[in-house]
Image: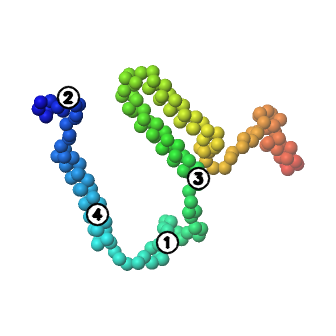
Amino acid sequence: MLAAEWKGVLGLVEMMNVDQYLPILGLLLLGVLFASGSFVASALLAPHKRPYDAKLAPYECGIVPEVEPPQRFPVRFYLVAMIFVIFDIEVVFMYPFAVVFRQLGTFGLIEVLAFSLTVFGALLFLISEGALSWGPVKHLTAGMPARTSSSTIVRIGVNSQSETAA
């Protein structure tokens, strides 16, 4: 038997040629050269003077800052960023499902619903913990009573005006 027939009999697959990977290798080499060239050019062309205090001070529209700015972001900022990333990933996972949803059938639909419910449950938990509440807690207060003629007279102060006139 010939070698081609043996490959077919044994179920061997023909090996890919290395030539097919040369464009990828070339792009990788080009990326490494560009990155290293950028670092070298930055080191050679950058000024080598030490910055003085005026250069290191933050610029606030010409006003000298009186208070040091806070160094840390609030934790809520990171929570909102993580919520964004989670929902962004969910949307990214929805695209392949939308492409092949007919081929996945009921199993795929159940899996996507389970994934979506898990993410939605996490969002409800974060909302209940107050992750999306910004600023101080606001309490509702009772407003002014319904407007009547007696409440309007009290607000205007008719009695005080008649006393000053007399």
Q: Residue furthest front?
A: 1
Q: Secondary structure at mark 4?
A: helix
Tag in front: 4 or 1: 4
At label 1, which amino acid type do we have?
A: Ala
Q: Secondary structure at mark 2?
A: helix
Q: Nearer the viewer, mark 1 or mark 2?
A: 2
Is residue 86 rendered to the left or right of residue 134? left
What residue does disc 4 label? 36
Mark drawn on residue 9: 2
Q: Residue at x 83, y 46 (%)?
A: 161
Q: Any mark on residue 75, and which? A: 3
The label nearer to you, 2 versus 4, is 2
Q: Amino acid at mark 2?
A: Val
**Along the line of sight, which residue is nearer the eye, 17 or 119?**
17
- Disc 4 residue crowd, few under 14, some 14–19, many 20+, Cα 10 Å: few
Q: Amino acid at mark 3?
A: Val
Mark 3 element type = helix
Which callout, 4 or 3, points to the residue nearer the camera?
4
Q: Secondary structure at mark 1?
A: loop
**Residue type indicated by callout 4:** Ser
